[in-house]
């Protein structure tokens, strides 16, 4: 093959390659276009749909659709139901049910008397449900301003005007100091009170006791009346039912003369009244 023919063949080959490259480039561009254009259109459609949803939500939230219409309070026996409903309506009435701050409602409700825990939930579109776990009183204690119910954790719950069959006598000696020592001693007082209440009920004596003085945990005393006079009976640290029964037996009918019964080891000692009426 002559040199002239070889040059001609090379030129033809280069032209073919360039044509193929241009064709391949155009094919790739068309393929990319087929993929990108639908993606862009889909994105635009989704953005538009999201905008519509936001607009619909804003319109619904600002309308009366989520306006509070019902408040349901569950498992409330002692907790102030009216106060709980007032808190819910005051807060949710401003925001609507959908935008209600449930955590804020929970915190406010748990500050109320007798409420230990509160769970707050929405009942869409227009309701709020409040479920309570209440604090249970286990004793009545006398503080400076009156008698108060207290739970097993030592939490002062609410004032109470009169003793009743549930708590027929009041505890004296509650330590109001905010300290670890006071908390420990008050916990011990509650244990003693509950044990006394149980045993004196077993002996059918609980309703005769007016108060129990637990200011000195080593020398608990029960206050009663005999012959129209106040009397005090030391009941020790255990066997409260038997000790109270023995003390009453020793002083019954003698309240005008004796003001109390002391424990002297296993024996009882009557204390003469210092001042007679």
Image (cartoon, rainbow, N blue to C red):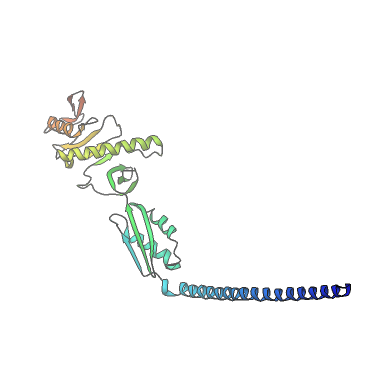
The quarter holding residue 167 reads top left
In the picture provided, is 13 more to the left or to the right than 112? right
Residue at 28% from the left image edge and 38% from the top image edge: 191
Dividing the image into 4 quarters, which one contains the C terminus? top left
Residue at 56% from the left image edge and 76% from the top image edge: 45
In the picture provided, is 95 more to the left or to the right than 204? right
Q: Total label count?
A: 0
x and y percentages locating residue 162 in the rendered image: 24, 48
The quarter holding residue 214 reads top left
- Considering every residue shown, the one lying at the far left of the view is 253
Decide if residue 256 is in sight here.
Answer: no
- Considering every residue shown, the one lying at the far front of the view is 1
x and y percentages locating residue 22 in the rendered image: 74, 75
x and y percentages locating residue 123 in the rendered image: 37, 66
- Relative to 139, does residue 46 appear above or below in the rendering? below
Residue at 51% from the left image edge and 72% from the top image edge: 54
Q: Nearer the viewer, residue 242 or 59?
A: 59
């Amino acid at each position: 093959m002559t040199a002239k023919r070889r040059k001609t063949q090379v030129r033809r080959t280069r032209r073919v390659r360039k044509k193929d490259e241009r064709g391949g480039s155009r094919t790739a561009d068309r393929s990319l276009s087929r993929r990108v254009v639908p993606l862009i259109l889909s994105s635009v459609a989704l953005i538009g749909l999201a905008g519509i949803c936001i607009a619909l939500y804003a319109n619904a939230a600002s309308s009366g659709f989520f306006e509070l219409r019902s408040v349901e309070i569950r498992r409330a026996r002692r907790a102030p139901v009216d106060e709980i409903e007032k808190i819910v309506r005051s807060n949710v009435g401003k925001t609507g049910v959908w935008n209600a701050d449930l955590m804020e409602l929970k915190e406010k409700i748990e500050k109320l008397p007798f409420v230990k825990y509160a769970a707050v939930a929405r009942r869409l579109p227009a309701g709020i449900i409040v479920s309570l776990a209440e604090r249970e009183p286990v004793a009545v204690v006398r503080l400076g301003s009156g008698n108060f119910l207290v739970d097993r954790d030592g939490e002062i719950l609410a004032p109470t005007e009169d003793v009743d069959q549930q708590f027929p006598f009041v505890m004296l000696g509650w330590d109001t100091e905010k300290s670890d020592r006071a908390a420990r001693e008050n916990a011990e007082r509650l244990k003693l009170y509950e044990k006394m209440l149980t045993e004196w009920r077993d002996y059918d004596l609980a309703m005769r006791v007016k108060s129990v003085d637990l200011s000195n945990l080593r020398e608990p005393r029960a206050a009663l009346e005999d012959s129209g006079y106040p009397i005090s009976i030391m009941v020790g640290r255990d066997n409260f039912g038997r000790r109270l029964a023995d003390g009453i037996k020793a002083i019954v009918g003698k309240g005008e003369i004796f003001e109390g019964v002391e424990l002297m080891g296993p024996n009882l000692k009557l204390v003469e009244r210092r001042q007679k009426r």
